[in-house]
Image (cartoon, rainbow, N blue to C red):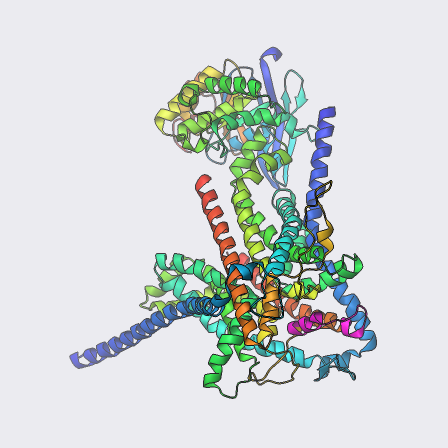
Amino acid sequence: MQNTEYRAQNTDIRRRIAFNKFCDYVFWVTGFLSTLVGLALLFTLMGDLFMDGYPRMSYRFLTSFPSRFPEEAGILSAWGGTCLLMFVTAFAAVPLGVAAGIYLEEYAKKNWLTDIIEINIANLAGVPSIIYGLLALGLFVYFFKFGESILTGGLALALLILPMVIIATREAIRAIPNSIREASYALGATKWQTVWWHIIPYSTGGILTGIIIGLSRAIGETAPIITVGALTFIAFLPSSPVSPEFPFLSFKWLLDPFTVMPIQIFNWVSRPQSEFHVNAAAAGIVLMVMTLLMNAVAIYIRYNYRKKIKW
Amino acid sequence: MKKNIKRKIKEDIIESILFLCALSSVIITAGIVVILAYESFGFFKEVPVMGFLTGTVWTPLFAEPKFGILPLVTGTLLVTMIALAVALPLGIMVAVYLSEYAPHKFRETIKPVLELLAAVPTVVYGYFALLFLTPLLQKFLPDLSGFNAISPGIIIGIMIVPYVSSVSEDSMRAVPMYIREGSYAMGATKLQTAFKVVIPAAFSGIAAAFIMGISRAIGETMVVAIAAGMMPNFTFNPMEPVQTLTSYIVQVSLGDVPHGTIEYKTIFAAGMTLFMMTLFFNIIGFWFRKRIREAY
Amino acid sequence: MVNDDLKAEAKNLNFYYGAIQALKNINLSIERRKVTALIGPSGCGKTTFLRCFNRMHDLYPHNRYEGEIVLFPEKINIVSPVIDPIEIRMQISMVFQKPNPFPKSIYENVAYGLRVRGINKKNILDDAVEKSLRSAALWDEVKNRLGSPSFDLSGGQQQRLCIARALATDPRILLFDEPTSALDPTATSKIEELIMQLKNEVTIIIVTHNMQQAARVSDYTAFMYLGEIIEFDKTDRIFTAPSNKLTEEYITGRFG
């Protein structure tokens, strides 16, 4: 090869390499920026919410009922409804979901029935939340005649987060190494003894994390609650769960009409008067703080459990 | 002997209880199908199916009701496609960046923050779309109506970026290093390796992630209910107000619709349409996820 | 071997993982209060055989036993489908290759076997825990920290904890599955000493890939290859004058 040809080839390749590296660099920058877009949006959203809602944040806001006057309207009934609703949701979803997860990981054999159950769980996790509202409407409101009540709303949300609880339970149980199970069985334990004494205690961290994240999702759910008929203007609290006479526990509140935080926000945002939008933003702040707090608690629990049990 | 039998009975009872709990998932799906089918069946007794599927006017609450579902379907698809136009490129770029370029510490800090995007309640996103994004966009697009499809579309797109990017990224990271090494050894850059080698190898996972995103966008309710308007509008113009299948159901539920009337049944007909659409995409997504498990 | 000295006897035992036959026509006598070692190259079936004794194979699908392992003096067949594996496991304990203490306290690890049997009274448990930990030569090292987590112990201590756990239920046969392969030489010799003491109280079957360990610790040795018993005899006979050529080749290191 003559020297001139060789040099030309060399520059050709060098140009190619330079071009490739340039593209690489451009992508590195755009990739980095794209990652920041999500962050940017999150901060803009939180900032905007905070700035809009700050004027209304006050003790009075937290303890008043909604009203026709935006300055006097508060979130007391919405907040009370949310708490009671979460209680029903947790009470229904947790035992059912954890039990299902235990069955699938420790008891289920590999057959067609197990496959069907697993396909169903995967499918339910992808069903839009409003469909759960329709299910609850037809089934709980009209068929079982629970009416448009906290019980119905709580059950609707329980069905919604059930797949999450089941999946979180299964993953937590899967992390337990098989050698522990073998050690337990080798000592003559039955399956249930192994589950009760080992599987459940060692997976509690993961399960709790999943439950809290599920509940933090449920707290912000609006669509299924609207569908089952939560009212958007409630100026009273549901009946108290404690009563002054025996047996000191009342269940009347389960069948009371109610409203929840996200619906209150929706109602205020939909009003044309911009003063109500301030209320919406303020309520949004409260809801976001609640959600972020729950997520933080879940992460903390997961971190703590990982420290205690190192496989 | 007796102790044995007692023990066995106790174990069997416990197993049966746990089994019934697991079966609940099947029962719930059956419940959804039964309720939707039952009410839709009642609906289609009064409304011809063909008219429903091909009609372009949806005014079931008027004195002279019309039951063409297409405006709601196009509304849903319009918003979904805008969302995907945002989420697809953004999601892939984030996934490629985090999986192939980002230093370990950066990835570990960014991922949880991105997950936070998914934790924000959808009403808050709706608030943001209506009261921040739409006015902002109106500065650039003065013809933009107060209720439109672009604003919720963009918001939903960014909402699903964490889902899409984290599943895509996980499947890209699952591609073994030695496959990348083959490409680097030939002088390829990170970019070329990522797009020519890693993405095709992780294709099933990425496809599954996007299907999941589509499903999520189709089923999104509150952002559109707040920011897209409640007017069924058979259009492909995203600057106009539209109504989706989901926000229609919300509209009816907010009002006073007696049980058993044709208006009541319309929400189940809309729900059935919605369910079929998401079921279709869920099945495709499931098929893709199965393919990943077989590959590794 | 006279019947009085027999603890267990495998008779024409065959074992299948699904369609694959892992054990072929095993006939072996286990003598009471002696250590019987199972040696052989990887994959010869020694661990498979060991796990038949406490029905561990029942935990996984598609496993099948044929033939018998007779337990004396009752003369019941351990691997019979009519016998509940839990019954067997309450009388035959196992120590595993990699120490697998429960992520609980030292006390709770040892007490677990008793709790499974419904024994929950604190004073009974306290006595049993102390007795087992002494038998496992661990008591002095942990007596002041019974409540601390088992993961705080070293590898060798964890294995001795697993031995204490297995002893707490007063087993008739104690199975060791390569108990020292994950431990350092000091821990290994401690456990070998322990095994030689324990045989005065309980019948021991040990699987080991370490021939010197088998020679040091056991009274009887069985050499296995490809799922069959090639030779079974008193340990010193096996290691000094094996009858089978294959045994000799394995012992002298020509393969495996």
Residue nearest the observer in this picture, A153 or C71? A153
Secondary structure predominantly adopted by residues drawn in magenta = helix
Check residue B112 for magenta coloring: no
Compared to residue A166, the image places residue A75 above or below, namely below
Q: Is residue B49 left or right of residue B86?
A: right
Task: Give coordinates of residue A118: x percent, y percent.
Answer: 64, 54
Residue drawn 74% across the image and 69% down it: B268
In the rendered image, the vertical position of residue A32 relative to residue A206, given as above or below: below
Numbered label tally: 0
Horizontal and vertical percent position of residue B252 = 71, 73
The quarter of the picture where residue B57 lies is bottom right
Residue located at (79% from left, 56% from top): A144
Q: Give x and y (percent) for residue A45.
A: 47, 69
Whether residue B280 is visible to the viewer of this picture, yes or no, is yes
Toward the right, the furthest residue is: B45
Residue A85: where, in percent of width, then height? 64, 55
Residue B221 visible within the image: no
In the figure, residue C89 lies in which quadrant? top right
Left or right of A202 on screen, residue A107: right
Specify whether B272 is left or right of C110: right
Q: Which residues are magenta?
A: B246-265
Q: Nearer the viewer, residue A143 or C54?
A: A143
Q: Is residue C151 above or below residue B77?
A: above
Q: Is residue A253 left or right of residue C235?
A: right
Is residue B248 located in the magenta-colored stretch of the structure?
Answer: yes
Vertical arrangement, residue A30 with respect to residue A285, above or below? below
Q: In the displayed image of the protein, which residue is found farthest to the left?
A: A3
Where's the N terminus of chain A, which quadrant?
Answer: bottom left
Q: Which quadrant would residue A23 be assigned to in this image?
A: bottom left
